[in-house]
């Protein structure tokens, strides 16, 4: 099924899964009311399939999880943060294309 | 690098591009739509659309685009996600050079690259973008729950979004450089009736200030008097500028702002090159006329191809 490789994160899971994860993680901060967030949804699912085992592709609903977006001063979505070894390696805000995201993800490999 | 040739390439996947794609694919042209981000364009950031006919209850910008994309897909419109860095035009062949180095060529080209939000170009704007400075109320409004924020502008977008933002913000102050609004009457009436929307007239924002996030703005009125206003968010909604950096504007013909000039059939002065949607030089920038222009441009492309062959 499409999207089964996308991990839906909560605030409680963030540190363990992303900061202490064995592989790099992409976190897509999104919300159901955000059109551009929904527009990139299918692409995020494709990337999760293509990068399975190499980069953890995750999504965090900012309405349900206010702590992590607050910690990273996120006041615009979609914002995608790429983490490696507990640090932000790269980030982008807006409905970017797949080509750009692939280039970003490859930096973490 | 692979080189691909098409009868028609459509550059950009907003309402104009998707409609041109629908018409061309349905008429069995060998067509490809090239989009650098995701299809949808500026409509994606429109919370609600009440003036696109056929949807009596209204619908979200996202839903409208999803339907447009699905309709084009039904006729097997080929789409490619790629960033075009240069457009080269000769009468015989139109060439698009991609960031990857790949080249796409076509007999006819429809330019639907659209427009993007205009900026104030003042201190603090760039540095605090995403940290309280926003160009999209729908995207970022909910981050300002129970806060006092500002909207800069006086057109349709500014006034519609000022009203929308009161769903979240405790107070929205519109700062406008004139003493009256350009926005359409129905939007003005709604904003004036909203007790959480206030107005500061005849004033310009000259700086946006804050340590890590927006804390205040500095405004100057038409008498030259300056003052500070505290705010955690500033929504800059002052019209659009064309996405025309990759286009050979001198060859195509453009107005003083860089919007592409066409005739009534959407043809530019370069044979076989059309433009549709917000990239065109025109007064009205609505979803409905972008779509209409896309249809006209696709039919113009067909005429060009059939006369040529």
Image (cartoon, coloured by chain):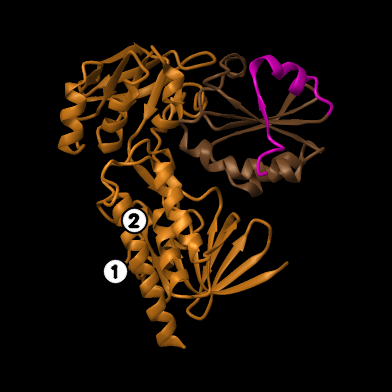
Q: Residue at x 49, y 62 (%)?
A: B74
Residue visible at 54% across and 60% down in the picture: B34
Q: Is residue B275 magenta?
A: no
- Residue B143, image x, y percentages: 46, 20
Say what secondary structure mark 2 lies in: helix
Left or right: where B64 falls relative to B212: left
What residue does disc 1 label?
A: B263
The residues colored magenta run A1-22
Label 1 resides on the chain identified as: B
- The reply to whether residue B148 is visible in this rendering is yes
Please give the name of the residue rendered at 45% of the width and 25% of the height, measured from the top-left corner.
B133
The color chain B is rendered in: orange
Whether residue B255 can be seen here: no
Question: Few, some or many C-alpha atoms within 10 Å of disc 1 (few <14, some 14-19, many ≥20)?
Answer: few
Q: Nearer the viewer, residue A51 or B8?
A: A51
| Mark 2 crowdedness (10 Å alpha carbons): few <14, some 14-19, many ≥20 | many
């Amino acid at each position: 099924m499409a999207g089964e490789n996308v991990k839906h994160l909560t605030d409680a899971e963030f540190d363990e899964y992303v900061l202490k994860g064995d592989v790099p993680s992409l976190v897509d901060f999104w919300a159901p009311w955000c059109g551009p967030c929904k527009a990139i949804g299918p692409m995020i699912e494709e990337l999760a399939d293509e990068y399975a085992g190499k980069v953890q592709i995750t999504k965090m609903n900012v309405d349900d999880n206010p702590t992590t977006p607050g910690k990273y001063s996120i006041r615009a979505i979609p914002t995608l943060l790429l983490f490696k070894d507990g640090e932000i390696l790269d980030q982008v805000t807006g409905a970017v294309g797949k080509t750009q995201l692939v280039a970003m993800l490859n930096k973490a490999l | 690098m692979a080189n691909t040739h098409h009868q028609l390439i459509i550059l950009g996947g907003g309402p104009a591009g998707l409609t041109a794609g629908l018409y061309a694919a349905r008429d069995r042209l060998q067509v490809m739509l090239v989009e650098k981000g995701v299809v949808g364009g500026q409509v994606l950031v429109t919370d609600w659309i009440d003036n696109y006919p056929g949807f009596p209850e209204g619908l979200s910008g996202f839903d409208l685009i999803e339907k447009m994309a699905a309709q084009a897909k039904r006729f097997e419109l080929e789409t490619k996600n790629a960033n075009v860095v240069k457009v080269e035009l000769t009468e015989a062949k139109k060439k698009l050079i991609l960031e990857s180095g790949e080249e796409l060529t076509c007999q006819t080209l429809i330019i639907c690259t659209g427009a993007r939000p205009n900026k104030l170009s003042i201190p603090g704007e760039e540095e605090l973008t995403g940290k309280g400075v926003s160009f999209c109320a729908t995207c970022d409004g909910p981050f300002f729950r129970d806060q006092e924020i500002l909207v800069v502008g006086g057109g349709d977008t500014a006034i519609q979004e000022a009203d929308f933002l009161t769903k979240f913000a405790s107070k929205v102050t519109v700062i406008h450089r004139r003493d009256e609004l350009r926005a359409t009457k129905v939007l003005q009436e709604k904003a004036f009736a909203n007790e959480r929307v206030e107005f500061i007239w005849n004033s310009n924002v000259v700086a946006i200030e804050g340590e890590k996030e927006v804390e205040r703005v500095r405004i100057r009125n038409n008498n030259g008097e300056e003052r500070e206003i505290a705010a955690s968010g500033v929504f800059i909604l002052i019209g659009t500028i064309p996405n025309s950096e990759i286009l050979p504007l001198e060859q195509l013909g453009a107005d003083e702002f860089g919007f592409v000039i066409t005739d009534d059939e959407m043809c530019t002065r370069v044979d076989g090159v059309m433009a549709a949607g917000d990239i065109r030089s025109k007064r009205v920038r609505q979803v409905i006329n972008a779509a209409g222009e896309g249809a006209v441009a696709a039919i113009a492309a067909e005429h060009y191809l059939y006369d040529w062959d």
